[in-house]
Image (cartoon, helix red, strand yellow):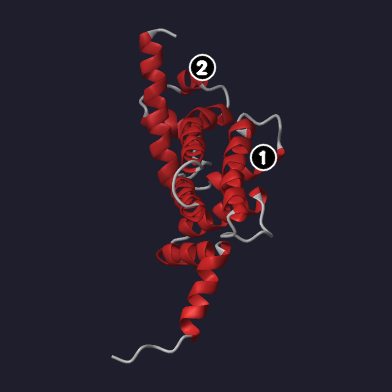
């Protein structure tokens, strides 16, 4: 790809990322082209379909979250690694309004440009969950599909203006429900008599 074509493509991705963060994944391609100060034909030459644009925009983030999961597998306590990755994954999916709907559909659609990235991301989370389960710190009645669904649910909360202020609190509730020791330790602490000072 020529340097000027690469520059135009990169500019389109930056503009598309901003537009999707503001308006959601259903933002008009014509609007993205207008914001980028190019014609729709130019946008379509680089990205012949909406999904191709989304794949190019999201693939880097998917890959970074997958790599992060791989790194977290080898360091720190398994429960901390799981919660850290889950928090970052939810934060990222909240950044692009409506992306969780696309991710859920792409998991099921092997023809989707996003399928491979979404499957890899789900597998990365599943490995962190399995590691925490093996250590006895995460519920064993959850799997990677459940974790992926929880990411989508938590990101959806962040997309709702009336619920967004509660999203952080609800993340902590869900995280403590996933981690068996955290929930039982909290419950046990509530039953213990307080020391008198």
Please tell me in which quadrant of the rendered image residue 113 appears.
top right
Residue 143 point in image, percent of width and height: 67, 52
Q: Residue at position x 62%, y 40% from top? A: 123
Q: Residue at position x 41%, y 26% from top? A: 12
Q: Are marks 2 and 1 in contact (CB under 8 Å)?
A: no
The number of discs equals 2
Front residue of 110/123: it is 123
Whether residue 101 appears in this view of the structure is: no
Pair 2/1: label in front: 1
Secondary structure of residue under mark 2: helix
Residue occupying the far left of the picture: 197
Whether residue 113 appears in this view of the structure is: yes
Residue occupying the far top of the picture: 2
Residue 60 point in image, percent of width and height: 47, 31
Q: Which comes before the other along the chain, label 2 or label 1?
A: 2
Instruction: Classify mark 1: residues with Cα within 10 Å, few (<14), some (14-19) or many (20+).
Output: some
Please tell me in which quadrant of the rendered image residue 33 appears.
top left
Say above or below: 46 vs 58.
Answer: above
Q: Which residue is mark 1?
A: 107
Front residue of 92/48: it is 92
Q: Residue at position x 44%, y 67% from top? A: 169
Q: Residue at position x 71%, y 32% from top? A: 110
Q: Which residue is mark 2?
A: 45
Instruction: Classify mark 2: residues with Cα within 10 Å, few (<14), some (14-19) or many (20+).
Output: few
Front residue of 71/48: it is 71
Residue 99 point in image, percent of width and height: 53, 44
Residue 72 point in image, percent of width and height: 47, 43
Location of the N terminus by quadrant is top left
């Amino acid at each position: 790809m020529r340097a000027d074509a690469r520059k135009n493509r990169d500019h389109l991705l930056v503009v598309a990322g901003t537009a999707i963060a503001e308006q959601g994944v259903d933002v008009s391609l014509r609007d993205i082209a207008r914001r980028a100060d190019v014609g729709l034909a130019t946008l379509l030459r680089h990205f012949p379909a909406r999904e191709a644009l989304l794949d190019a925009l999201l693939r880097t983030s998917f890959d970074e979250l997958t790599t992060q999961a791989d790194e977290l597998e080898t360091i720190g306590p398994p429960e901390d690694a799981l919660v850290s990755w889950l928090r970052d994954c939810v934060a990222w999916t909240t950044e692009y309004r409506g992306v969780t709907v696309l991710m859920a559909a792409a998991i099921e659609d092997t023809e989707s440009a996003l399928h491979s990235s979404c499957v890899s991301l789900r597998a990365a989370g599943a490995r962190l969950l399995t590691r925490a389960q093996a250590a006895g710190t995460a519920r064993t009645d959850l799997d990677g599909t459940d974790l992926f669904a929880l990411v989508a649910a938590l990101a959806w909360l962040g997309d709702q203006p009336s619920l967004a202020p509660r999203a952080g609190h609800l993340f902590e509730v869900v995280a403590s429900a996933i981690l068996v020791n955290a929930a039982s330790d909290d419950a046990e602490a509530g039953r213990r008599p307080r020391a008198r000072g």
